[in-house]
Amino acid sequence: MALRFSRNCFLPIASCGLLLCATDAWADKLSLSVDGVDGELRAAVLAALDLSQYTAGEVSAAQARRLYSHAAEQASKALEPYGYYDTRVDGELTQSSDAWNAVVHVHPGEPVVVAAANLVLEGPARELKAVRTALRAFAPKVGEPMNHAQYERGKTAIQAALFASGFLDAKLPTHKVTLTRSTRKATIDLVWEPGPRYRIGATKFEGAQFPAEFLTRYVPWQEGDYYTQELLLGLQQKLTDADYFALVDVNPDIEHAQDGVVPITVKLAPAKRSIYTAGLFVGTDTGFGVRGGLERRWLNRRGHKLKTEIILAERLKTVSALYQIPLPGPDSRSFNYGVNFRDENSESVQARTASAVANETRQWMGFTRTLGVHLQTGDFTFGDKDRGTIKGNSTVLYPEIGLTRKRADDPLFVRDGYSLNLLGRAAKGGLLADTDFVQVRADAKWIHGIGQRQRLILRGSLGAIWANDFDALPPDLRFFAGGDRTIRGYGFQSIGPQRVLIDGEDPVVFGGKDLAIASAEYEYYFRRNWGVAAFVDAGDAFSGSDYSVKVGTGLGLRWRSPVGMVRFDLATPVGDPDRHGVEIHLVIGPDL
């Protein structure tokens, strides 16, 4: 049994008595096929057809015929917003033994195209960058089909650009589209009246736990500056980053705007003041461990902060505290004072050190710049009783400068982003330092998404030390390689210059003056949260001319867990006659 139609030629109901008398039994399913259009047009037709809503279930004969009888009109109407006003639709409805099969052939014809687009906006508003950009981007353009959705989006974008630039009274008194179906031409006429450009008035803070004098230091404008949405978003981001508030809402108080001045209202709600953290963790370099901490988001009405943390792991124990004094302003300065005790017991190094640091951080030329002074003292031992030991004790006072820059489209799972860290240190022997030394280091990482399921990750590190007495430097000021974050396939800090202390025993790694590391990694995600990786790492920690590249390669498993990225890698050395076997590496933490 088949029913055929075209848009302009349906069989009258009265002439279909035989069809109406057909069985009204339930069929197993309804199938639908639409051809003649692709992409956005096909999606629009499918969305408009009532038939589409029944393809997942069962229909009776009467339902199938009724739904199909409306298909031509629905498909034609669906294409009119895209500029197609002469659409012709035909097809057929057939019944097999267990299903109704609907076929819809769409013949869109020639679209109505834009013959002229008259966008009239006079005065200084037209010269502003955001407004110029919106005007240039307006669509549909001359010669393109008269797409009504694009037209509405273009109007809205220009209006939004005017509002965001301070023209809060902007109006669009003329907005019309003239269609001539006989010539398939459309003319767009849009005329704006931007009105005055507003300036920023007084800024009022509501609901905060701090005095207005402190909060005003976050404001990135002066009263009387031209209003822009960008400035308001800047204040909102600064207050959010300060980590004092659970709610930050910055808006113009248009109701009380007058004489070209608009006040700003900032509604705030305090965040939870104390944050307690505790949990288990595991890392190949540190072993299993527990960590706990307390963070006070603010200690007083001047916004001072305190953060403490304790880590107890198989090969690492630390206790630290950091006191921070924010100085909000254009460069987001802060003074930071910290103390730390560290007990490290790896296969290569055993060290106990205490340190204190005082520094200033601020935004500088797109970087976070850190200037400070660091005092460190402690004992250290390289090797063990079987291979022999090198023991030392050092006290070092040194200034340091650091530059950090990071960009990421998504901090939890980066598809496009990078990080760059530059560090410089120096000390003068005799000034609470056992030796003269200068140290520089650069670390970079780049992540790029390929399609929807793949990522390429490149990483590199370079470092150098100049020291009068290198043996007086503590382990954490020397360069080592091997482990999760340098060259996988080698154990933690197992790469570096070596000394044989006991004849016939394995040498002891005591660290190097230079560092050169490079890594390339490819990830493929076979499910949204699960992926596999292949990687190769290469480089060395060395001193002077004894560079000998070490290569590690392997495969890994990736899991986007609720607590962050989990990386499980199996890696092995390549071309190294002295190193064999497979190293297991497990890391939990962010990409950058």
Image (spheres, rainbow, N blue to C red):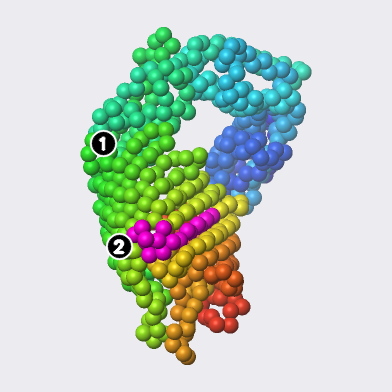
x and y percentages locating residue 531 in the rendered image:
52, 61
Frontmost residue, 94 versus 460: 460
Magenta stretch in the rendered image: 428-444
Residue ranking furthest to the bottom: 504
Q: Relative to the observer, which residue lies in front, 431 or 188?
A: 431
Q: Specify the quadrant of the image occupied by residue 476.
A: bottom left
* Position in image of residue 105 (x %, y %): 71, 38
Q: Is residue 189 above or below residue 538?
A: above
Residue 495 to residue 202: above or below: below
- For the residue pair 407 and 224, the one nearer the viewer reads as 224
Q: Which residue shows up at 47% across the image and 19% down it?
A: 226
Q: Is residue 50 above or below residue 228?
A: below
Asked where in the image residue 140 lies, by quadrant, the reply is top right
Residue at image location 44% in from the left, 50% down from the top? 401
Residue labelled with disc 1:
302
Mark 1 secondary-structure assignment: loop
Q: Quadrant of the N terminus?
A: top right
Which residue bears the numbered disc 2? Answer: 354
**Would you say residue 192 is visible in this rendering?**
no
Whether residues under marks 1 and 2 lie with C-beta atoms below 8 angstroms apart, the answer is: no
Residue 573 shows up from this direction: yes
Q: Residue furthest left?
A: 300
Crowding near the residue tagged with mark 2, few <14, some 14–19, many ≥20 C-alpha atoms within 10 Å: some
| Three-letter code for the amino acid on which mark 1 is drawn | Arg
Closer to the camera, 95 or 491? 491
Q: Position of residue 432 (x, y in %)?
A: 34, 59
Expressed as whole percent of the image width and height from the top left, the position of residue 316 reads: 34, 68
First reached walking from the N terminus: tag 1 or tag 2: 1
What residue is rendered at 56% in x and 53% in y?
A: 446
